[in-house]
Amino acid sequence: MLAKSAASLVLLALAAPLAAQTAAPPQTWIHAGRLIDRPGKPVRGPATIVIENGRIVAVRDGIVAPDRADARVIDLTGKTVLPGLIDSHVHLTSDTGGIAGQLEEITLSPAAQAFNAQVNGLKTLRAGFTTVRNLGDGDGATLALRDAVAAGKAIGPRIVDAGNSISGTSGHMDGSLGYRDELRPMFDGAGNTCNGAEDCRRATRLQIARGADVIKFASTGGVNSRIGAGLGRQMFDDEAKAIVETAHMFGKKVAVHAHGADGIALAIAAGADSIEHGTILTSELVNQWAKAKTYYVPTLSTVNGYKERLAANPNAYAPDVLEKIKWRIEITGQSLRTLVPRGVRIAFGTDAGVSKHGRNADEFELMVANGMTPTSALVAATTNAADLLGLTNEIGSIEQGKSADLIAVTGDPLADMTVLKRVEFVMARGRVVE
């Protein structure tokens, strides 16, 4: 009896934090000192945001007292309040990287990766990023976390998930690269590599069947992939077109990993919704991109991850990968400086996983250093990112009817973006994140 009682107390203690998150008052009234309700529009002065059942029901000028006795009041009059931030490119299951990261892929169980994803998701949420687009993991950990967060079973950011990223055999997303020949069959069951248009339709349908919200594929080589085939195009026209057409037929957007100009041009011509990395440009490609509606997700923060790992361990990466990393560090930011003046739409994305989770806001400094204004960088992380994710009616601004995702900082992020590294208040879907 004593042991049973002790076990019950432990279970109650474990359940308490989640129970506290699910018990909400009828209304929450937030008093903001300054309000950036729609980034890119004029900043408002003191304002009151009324929240009920996880949604914004009113935004009023001035500090307004609640009109009901049971309302909860949160005093942020000394803060700047703005929409919850959106990172359009993360990998939640790890941020180990290098050879150690490759070892994790074969030593950590799917259950262990799921716990990693939950911890990294919570770091990201506490940093003020209330929504993320997770662009690939092999075992479905983030698909499960996405559903657990949506159901209130776990605390984390809203997740838009790509399932397993697609590429041609020997392409960037081929998980068997870098392993001995006899081990390669172990990776065949992933089903994410394809050869030919029909097979690429199959691979796309497989991710949709798994519940993917968005489809990601690689049209070029990658910096971290273990193959000495460069960073140019690694997919044929009909293969890329088959992936995009199949995804769009099912109402799914398409994100494309692309470094080389030929692979970027291929993806834009195929109708991709976003290009991730977009490192090498030509004048012809820039003209093509400027006429398209394809978003650019720069992922500049990757260089932070590379520099930090190499500072800690010069042998953190295999020699064939290290050569590409040194090149990536040197060239990062050049594409953004070229594309911004041409009016290409920019959405915020870090590639966290290559860089550290919870430090997503480091990207803002790099964006401003490479041609963006603080206002346009904030737009990229809110309204633009919401549009890219197909969630404009849900997130990206503080407006009546939208999800109550908002953050608060001391200072003015439009004058000093580093204040976004010190987020002091986070609310996700109407719940205060402790």
Image (cartoon, helix red, strand yellow):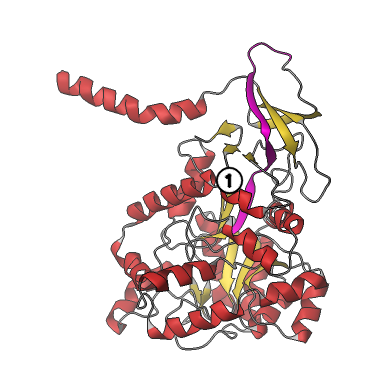
Judge from the rendering whether residue 262 lies leftward or rightward of residue 116; answer left or right: right
* Residue 311 x, y percent position in the rendering: 41, 72
- Tell me which residue sits at (75%, 73%) in the image: 339
Q: Is residue 13 above or below residue 119?
A: above
Judge from the rendering whether residue 321 lies leftward or rightward of residue 202; answer left or right: left
Q: Is residue 260 magenta?
A: no
* Residue 383 x, y percent position in the rendering: 74, 51
Quarter of image, res 89: bottom right
Circle 1 residues within 10 Å: few <14, some 14–19, many ≥20: many
Q: Which residues are magenta?
A: 67-88
Secondary structure, magenta segment, majority class: strand
Question: In the current view of this chain or complex, which residue is farthest to the top?
Answer: 69
Mark 1 lies on a secondary structure that is loop
Quarter of image, res 330: bottom right
Q: Which residue is mark 1?
A: 128
Query: Relative to the observer, which residue lies in front, 96 or 62?
Result: 62
Residue 220 visible in the current orientation: no
Query: Relative to the observer, which residue lies in front, 17 or 150?
Result: 17
Q: Is residue 68 above or below residue 287?
A: above
Question: In the current view of this chain or complex, which residue is farthest to the bottom?
Answer: 229
- Tell me which residue sits at (62%, 83%) in the image: 260
